[in-house]
């Protein structure tokens, strides 16, 4: 399983979260062809990759970048959304943006140079994470997990709700893994989308900010408490396998090979060897210029959303010695 997002390489799809500094709301969409220096804006929250393009939740916008040349990404277009873009996922020719108190925004990206908002669904919470599976959007809004049918793009409808204090969600088959902030990890069955059922849970102290999984393990980032690894061989009774602290504030995690790559706040990207998930080892890192919030891995490159430095593309061919692509 991978997020390519949250968080599909963000783990579970190509595809994570948290707040951005404000940029003024302009109710229009635009296109451009800027250099890498021009696109390293502040307020980058999450990035999702699909093909040669990166879809970025940034400030109050969805920004689309051409990353076919990782050393020279360029802006393709920008579409402003009415709320703060905290999370994003992409399916088919649509982008789904978790837009804070403005809920779910559905954007047509069939024309990459002219993205257009088609519809929305207000969740009544603060939508911070979205994961797509089939035509359903799973939205974590701080209070609940909302399951939304998006087949009618201009009129999405609520199918099911689960009260859990949901802050972040990823989908794996018929299961939703939900990081519930102070309430731990919930594993839900989504076989009946109108009535998602709790299969198992893991309760832990601290703030669970994001989750992803690979094989029989779930990986949870917990801010100042680093990374927590959960054994999910039996989803009814998940068990703690290991913990490892990081030097910064762990906000997101992506799994690639035998490594966990962590967006670690002020200490940038941190790399943990998980070849034995019960004995994780911190083996490398790369300090981004600002505050690293989100990470997605594809083809030996880490795409890190940095609050001040924008999108940082890092070469991880040698995972223990990552380097910036344009260095």
Image (cartoon, helix red, strand yellow):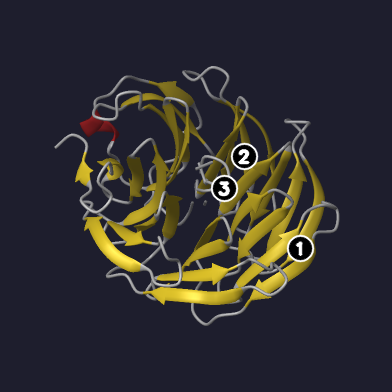
The image shows residue 197 at horizontal and vertical percentages of 80, 64
Q: Nearer the viewer, residue 3 or 137?
A: 3
User: Is 253 above or below relative to 11?
Assistant: below
Q: Which residue is label 3 attached to?
A: 1
Q: Is residue 4 left or right of residue 270?
A: right
The image shows residue 106 at horizontal and vertical percentages of 63, 35
Q: Quadrant of the C terminus?
A: top left
Looking at the image, tell me whether mark 1 or mark 3 is earlier in sequence order.
3
User: Is 3 above or below relative to 232?
Assistant: above
Q: Which residue is label 1 attached to?
A: 162
Looking at the image, tell me whether mark 2 or mark 3 is earlier in sequence order.
3
Q: Nearer the viewer, residue 322 or 5?
A: 322
SS at circle 1? strand
Viewer-side label of 2, 3: 3
Q: Residue at x 48, y 54 (%)?
A: 17
Looking at the image, tell me whether mark 2 or mark 1 is earlier in sequence order.
2
Q: Which residue is label 2 attached to?
A: 105
């Amino acid at each position: 399983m991978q997020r390519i997002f949250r968080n599909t390489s963000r783990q579970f799809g190509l595809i994570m979260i948290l707040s951005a500094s404000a940029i003024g709301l302009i109710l229009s969409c635009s296109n451009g062809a800027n250099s890498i220096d021009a696109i390293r804006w502040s307020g980058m929250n999450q990035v999702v990759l699909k093909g040669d393009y990166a879809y970025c939740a940034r400030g109050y916008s969805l920004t689309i970048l051409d990353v076919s040349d990782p050393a020279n990404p360029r802006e393709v277009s920008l579409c402003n959304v009415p709320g703060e873009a905290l999370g994003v996922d992409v399916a088919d020719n649509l982008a789904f943006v978790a837009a804070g108190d403005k809920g779910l925004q559905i954007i047509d990206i069939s024309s990459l140079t002219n993205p257009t908002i088609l519809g929305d669904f207000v969740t009544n919470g603060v939508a911070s994470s979205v994961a797509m599976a089939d035509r359903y959007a799973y939205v974590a809004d701080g209070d609940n997990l909302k399951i939304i049918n998006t087949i009618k793009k201009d009129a999405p409808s609520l199918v099911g709700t689960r009260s859990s204090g949901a802050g972040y969600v990823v989908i794996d088959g018929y299961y939703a893994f939900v990081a519930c902030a102070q309430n731990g990890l919930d594993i839900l069955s989504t076989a009946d989308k109108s009535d998602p059922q709790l299969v198992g849970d893991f309760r832990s102290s601290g703030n669970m900010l994001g989750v992803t999984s690979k094989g029989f393990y779930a990986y949870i980032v917990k801010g100042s408490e680093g990374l927590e690894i959960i054994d999910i061989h039996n989803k009814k009774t998940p068990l703690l396998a290991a913990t490892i602290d990081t030097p910064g504030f762990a906000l997101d995690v992506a799994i690639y090979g035998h490594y966990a790559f962590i967006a670690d706040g002020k200490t940038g990207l941190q790399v943990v060897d998980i070849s034995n998930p019960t004995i994780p080892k911190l083996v490398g890192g790369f300090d981004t210029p600002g505050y690293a919030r989100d990470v997605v891995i594809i083809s030996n490159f880490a795409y890190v959303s940095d609050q001040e430095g924008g999108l940082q593309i890092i070469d991880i061919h040698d995972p223990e010695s990552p380097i910036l692509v344009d260095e």
